[in-house]
Amino acid sequence: MSGALPMRAPLFPLAGAILFPRAQLPLHIFEPRYREMVRDAVDGGGHIAMVQPRAIDDGARVEPIYPVGCVGEIVGLEELEDGRFNIILNGSHRFRIVSEVDLDTPYRNADLDLAAFDDREPDPLGLAQRAEVEREARRLGDALGLTVDWAAVGRLDDEMLVNAIAQVAPFDVSAKQALLEAETLDGRADMLVQLMQFLRLSQGTADLQPTIQ
């Protein structure tokens, strides 16, 4: 592929678990196949490719997944006595899956294109846009009854703020995927504000979650 930046890595499909470049994601690994994945990753390059599953298709041979995810580097590792792991991933690059490969492992593997997105550090948000993100985050936090250290939130840089909210907010899978795939930080911030407004206004409305088709 012209201009591609190839990489091969294990795939970890996990609904709602979104990782961004320069963000961190703590995970508890308990399934035997993913314990093996962690061991293999530690013995290899130390990377795991986080992806989200699509809606379940009962006729599919394997679980369908979104083609875009983010590579995480294992920067924290705790192996528990029973073989489970607590790990921390640090996001490096978003990717687009080129193809899955059969490596005779209990977990899935794929060839990835790391050049599919420009993941250099973004320009900061405008002051008004930053203020809008913080304002909607406060409103949503109040609507959900959350206790938040807003002083600490205010000290986050723009990228950390937007991505942290995108990671922890209770949006559905398709909405989180759309946030991940946003080309620019300001585009992600605009989308995040809309999703937070929708979620806040939908409080008290049964089974209504922000979603992007």
Image (tube, rainbow, N blue to C red):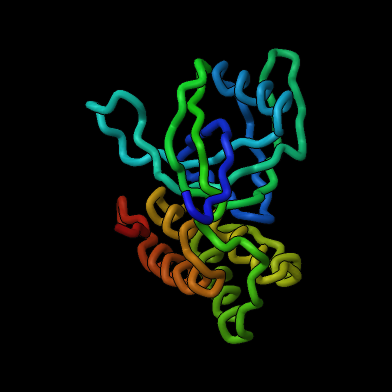
**Foreground residue, 114 or 55?**
114
Instruction: Examine the rendered structure and indicate whether residue 92 appears above or below residue 12.
Output: below
Q: Which quadrant is the C terminus positioned in?
A: bottom left
Find residue 90 and report its horizontal and vertical position in percent.
69, 46
Q: Quadrant of residue 166?
A: bottom right
Q: Residue furthest top?
A: 82
Q: Quadrant of residue 125?
A: bottom right
**Foreground residue, 128 or 53?**
53
Residue 171 lies left or right of residue 133; in this view the side is left
Q: Residue furthest front?
A: 2
Find residue 48 and report its horizontal and vertical position in percent.
61, 36
Residue 175 lies left or right of residue 132; in this view the side is left
- Image point (62%, 58%), residue name: 164
- Image point (42%, 65%), residue name: 195
Find residue 185 and report its horizontal and vertical position in percent.
56, 70
- Image point (34%, 57%), residue name: 211
Find residue 60 and report its horizontal and vertical position in percent.
27, 28
